[in-house]
Amino acid sequence: MSILVFIDQADGHIKKASFEAATYGAKLAAQLGTTAEALVLGTVSDDLSTLGQYGIKKVHTVSDASLNKMDAAVYADVIAQAAGQATVIVLSNNTTGKAVAPRLSVKLKAGLVSGAISLPDTSQGFVVRKSVFSGKAFANIAVKTDKKIIALNPNAFGTETGAGSAEVAAVQASIPASNVEVVAVNKVSGEVPLSEADIVVSGGRGLKGPENWGLVTELAQLLGAATACSRPVADIHWRPHHEHVGQTGLAIAPNLYIAIGISGAIQHLAGVNRSKTIVVINKDPEAPFFKAADYGIVGDAFEVVPKVIEAVKKIKAS
Amino acid sequence: MKILVCISKTPDTTAKIAFTDNNTKFATDGVQWIINPYDEWYALVRAIELKEADPSIALHLLNVGGADSEPIIRKALALGGDEAIRVNSEENDSFFVASQIANIAKEGGYDLVFTGKETIDYNGSSIGGMVAELLGNTYISHATKFDLQDGKALVTREIEGGEEQCQAAFPLVVSCQKGMAEQRIPNMKGIMGARTKPLKVVEPIAVDSMTSVVSFELPPAKAGVKLVSADQPEELVRLLREEAKVI
C-alpha cells in the first residue's frame, strides 16, 4: 500500500497546485506509515527529482507527447494503470483534477473527496474535510471504499520543502486513443493565471467604467497579481468573462484579495471567501464586504488607490 | 438527436447556511430552492438554444431527487425542454447520483448529456465525469461554448492556464459553465405550457454509495475588519507586509 500523487503539468512545467498535492501526499504517507510516490504524464522539462524536496520518494513518468493534451478518459486510464497497489490517490482539484478524478473514482471503485482541505482523520475510518456551500461551510466526508481519491483544493494546504531527491523512472503504460481532437489552444500568456495567483486585485462597478481599470491593472502589476472583477462588471462587458470571480464565476483562494469598488454581495463572497487575507476599498462604509474583510479603507477608490500604488512603489523600492 | 440535461435542486445563492441535528443536516427552514445555476443558466439554456435551432432535437430533463424537487423541475420545463424524468430518491453521494443518471442515459440512448460544472451546495464537480466513465463516453469538462458542426460537437473548454477548442463525436458528456449561454427568465407561455409537459417519476436502481457526510461545520468567524484611514494608505501597505505578510 502506498500513496500516489498525480502531478499536473502544463507546457513542460509542474503546476504550482501539484507541489501542494505532493506535500499533502507525503504528509498523508507519514500519517499512514507508508511512502508517497508521484506520477507525471507527458513531456516535462522540469527536474522531477526535485519532487523529493516535497517528500516524494519515487516519480513515475509516462513521457508520451500525446499526453501533453489533457483528455479525462485517457488520463484516468493511464493513472489507473500506474496506480497499481496504491490505496490513496491524491490530485489537485484544479481544472485537470476535476475532469479526471471522477472518472478515476468510477474506474477504481475508489470513493472521491473533491475539494479536500485537510489531512484525513483516520482515528475512526477515513474522514476528510472538504469545502462545501461555495466556501461558506465545511463537510466531513467518510470514504467507505478500500481505495480512496482525494482532490485537494488549490491553496488550501500549502507546501513544505526539505532535503530530498526523488528517484525518477519511466513506467510502462498503454495509452488509449483519444476521442477528443484539439482544434485550437489559447493560453493566457504574460499574465498571472487567476486560479494560481497568490495575489488578486479585483474591481467592481464602483470603478464606473472600463476606462478606469488602469488603477486595478497598475496595482496588480506592481504586486505581481492577477486581475479579477465582479459579475456585473463582466456582464456589462467592462472586463472579460474569465475574470469574473464569484458564485457563478471562478472561485479563488489567493493569499491576498484586494477588492476595489465591490460591495460584496453574498454571491461574490462565495467565490473569494477562501482567500487568506481580504482587503476592501469602498466609499460606502455600509458595504457588506467590510464584514468579510481583514483590512479596509473607507474612501473613494479614485483617491485612495493611486495613494496605495505610491505606497507599494515605495515599499518595493526600499 | 437526443439531449439529456441534468438539473439539481440547490439552496438559493443568498440562503443562510446553517445546520441541524447535531450538525449532520443542512437547515432547510426558510430556504428558497432553485435550479443549480450552472445547470440552469449554462447547461439547460444552451440545450434549449440548440433545440430552437433544430426542432428535431429531443430535449429531456433529469433530476435525481425527492418529490420536493418538482417545483424546480417545472420551472426548468417552463424555460424549455420536451419532458422531464425524476429519479425518486433523496440525495446521496455523487457516485449514487451519477449511477442513476448513467442508467437513464443508457436506457434512453441519449447522444449528449449536459451537466453543470458543479452544484453550489456540495461543490463536487464529479457528476459529469462519473457519468461519462459509467457510460464509457467521452467527457469534456468546463465547457464555455458548445456548437454542433458536421454531426460532431465543437466545444471550447477551460483548461489549466487558458482554453482550448476541441471536436468530439457523440455520444458525449459535457459539463457546462459561464460563457455557454445567458440566463433566461421563463415567460408566461412557458410557465403555462410546463404544467402539462410529461414528468415521469422512476424509482432508483440499487447502488452502494462510496462516501457519506459525517458532519458539517461553519468556518470560524472573522476577527473583524481593521480599518485604515483613507489618508494613510501607507499604513495599509505596512500592515499587509508586516502583519499579514502577504506582499
Image (cartoon, rainbow, N blue to C red):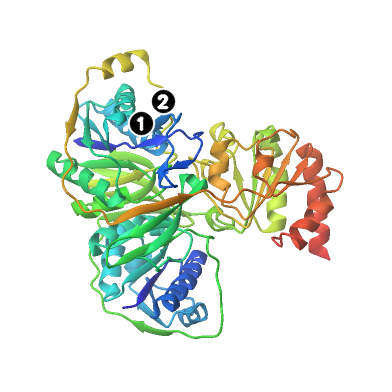
User: Does B198 sit left or right of A200 as displayed?
Assistant: left
Query: How many numbered circles are shown?
Result: 2
Above-or-below relation of B230 to B77: below
Chain designation of label 1: B
Q: Position of residue B81 (x, y in %)?
A: 26, 27
Q: Which residue is mark 1?
A: B45
User: Residue at 78% of width from left, 62% of height from top?
Assistant: A316
User: Which residue is rendered at x = 34% and y = 24% of the image?
Assistant: B75
Distance from the alpha carbon under mark 2 to that under mark 1: 7 Å
Q: Is residue B192 visible?
A: yes
| Marked residue chain, label 2 | B
Task: Pinpoint residue A310: horizontal percent, then vertical percent.
Answer: 82, 52
Picture layout, residue A66 above or below residue B15? below
State the image coordinates of residue A81 (x, y, percent, origin top left).
25, 72
Question: What residue occupies the far left of the structure in this picture?
Answer: B107
Identify the residue under disc 2: B184
The answer to whether the residues at label 2 and label 1 have Cβ atoms under 8 Å apart is yes
At 67% from the left and 46% from the top, the residue drawn is A293
Nearer-the-camera pick, A93 or B142: A93
* Residue drawn at x 14%, y 38% as measured from the top left: B108
Question: Considering only order in the chain, which callout, 1 or 2, is on the residue closer to the N terminus?
Answer: 1
Q: Splitting the image into 4 quarters, where does residue B88 fall?
A: top left
Question: Residue A254 in the image: x percent, y percent?
Answer: 59, 55
Looking at numbered disc 2 in the image, what kind of residue is underneath it? Arg
